[in-house]
Amino acid sequence: MTPQAKLIFAISLLLGTTIVISSNHWVTIWAGLEINTLAILPLIAKSHHPRAIEAATKYFLTQATASTLLLFSATTNAWYTGQWDITQLTHPAACLILTSALAMKLGLAPFHFWFPEVLQGSSLTTALILSTAMKFPPMTLLLITSPSLNPTLLTSMAILSAALGGWMGLNQTQIRKILAFSSISHLGWMVIIVSYNPKLTLLNFYLYALMTTTVFLTLNVIKTSKLSTLMTTWTKTPALSAMLMLTLLSLAGLPPFTGFLPKWFIIQELTNQNMAPAATAIALLSLLGLFFYLRLAYCATITLPPHTTNHMKQWHTNSPTSITIAILTTTSIMLLPISPMILTTI
């Protein structure tokens, strides 16, 4: 793919996202989402590998269905109320259809099946865009329309996402699939609190995007996409592997790291809303995710490959680590001490 084509697709992604987050009319929001979908498709299919073509097809069909549902929801609401404004969503059927459409756009359970397959068929860079930037427009819509949506339904879908994201990630050996199930699990944490404190959802999304970007960029530098090759990277880039381990533990939500911050705030807010059973359930389900993060961290640093490994031992490289990865890793690990300051801003 030529640099000019990449630039056009990048600008289209930016344009689509900007249209969605700045519009208050359903038709322009739908148009922005369509621009986004059409801009990312060539990036998914650029390798011309059958798996990449399959991933692009699955992505297109799912996103087209979700966009149709979104337009159907807006039309239903306009038919009954005469309002096309995004904040005037009042008809119950329209709210239910919109919930399904946004869940499909985000990859929230039970509409999550496309996401691991699409990520597995994409390159690491495209997988990063799909996991972070492509989730921002539907997440914005969810935040704006959250007062109209059914909180019980959202809570049920959130707990289901946390459960399925944890369980289905347990026996995976492909790192992109593990990170896809990790994304589904994190979406559960974001959605469970959206009806009660949308700012916490946004904070969780920002920190999740920060940590996921760090992991994907690190994996891209060490050229790793399977657990078996991750075991051999310690000899090549020991410092980067150590930082990857700490970032993965942060993504798991362990206390001294940044990832613990949103989980702590969300459990606190759920308890204040008299939703202690939901808080307990989602906290216990996050332990499933902790297992595969620990497995990744273990493979990244603690194990040295056995002598019977099929992979060639890699040479140690002295090339300097990118300043972007250094900054992202630092923020992914060390933001917990400034949590009182973050708490005052939300």
Image (cartoon, rainbow, N blue to C red):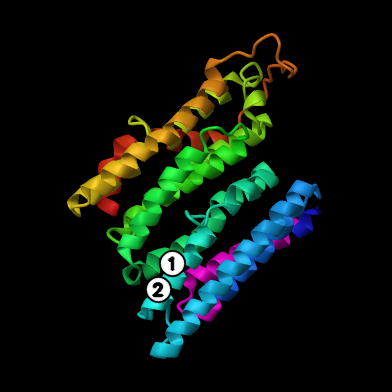
**Amino acid type of the residue tagged 1 in the rendering:** Thr
Judging depth in this view, the residue of 305 and 308 nearest the camera is 308
x and y percentages locating residue 212 in the rendered image: 52, 42
Q: Residue furthest top?
A: 307
x and y percentages locating residue 59 in the rendered image: 65, 58
Can see residue 291? Answer: yes
Can see residue 209? Answer: no
x and y percentages locating residue 38 in the rendered image: 68, 65
Q: Left or right of 29: which side holds 53?
A: right
**Is residue 20 on the magenta stretch?**
yes
The vertical placement of 298 against 185, above or below, is above
Image quadrant in which you'd find residue 11: bottom right
Q: Left or right of 189: which side holds 274?
A: left
Judging depth in this view, the residue of 322 and 104 nearest the camera is 104
Marking on residue 99: 1
Q: Residue at 60% of width from left, 35% of height from top? A: 175
Q: Residue at 55% of width from left, 38% of height from top? A: 178
x and y percentages locating residue 3 in the rendered image: 77, 54
> Whole-Å distance between the Cαs marked 2 and 1?
6 Å
Describe the element under mark 2 as helix, strand or loop. helix
Marking on residue 95: 2
**Is residue 281 on the magenta stretch?**
no
Region rendered in magenta:
6-29
Judging depth in this view, the residue of 243 and 173 nearest the camera is 173
Q: Residue at 51% of width from left, 21% of height from top? A: 298
Image quarter of the C terminus: bottom left
**Amino acid type of the residue tagged 2 in the rendering:** Cys
Q: Is the magenta stretch mostly helix, strand or loop?
A: helix
Judging depth in this view, the residue of 181 and 8 nearest the camera is 181
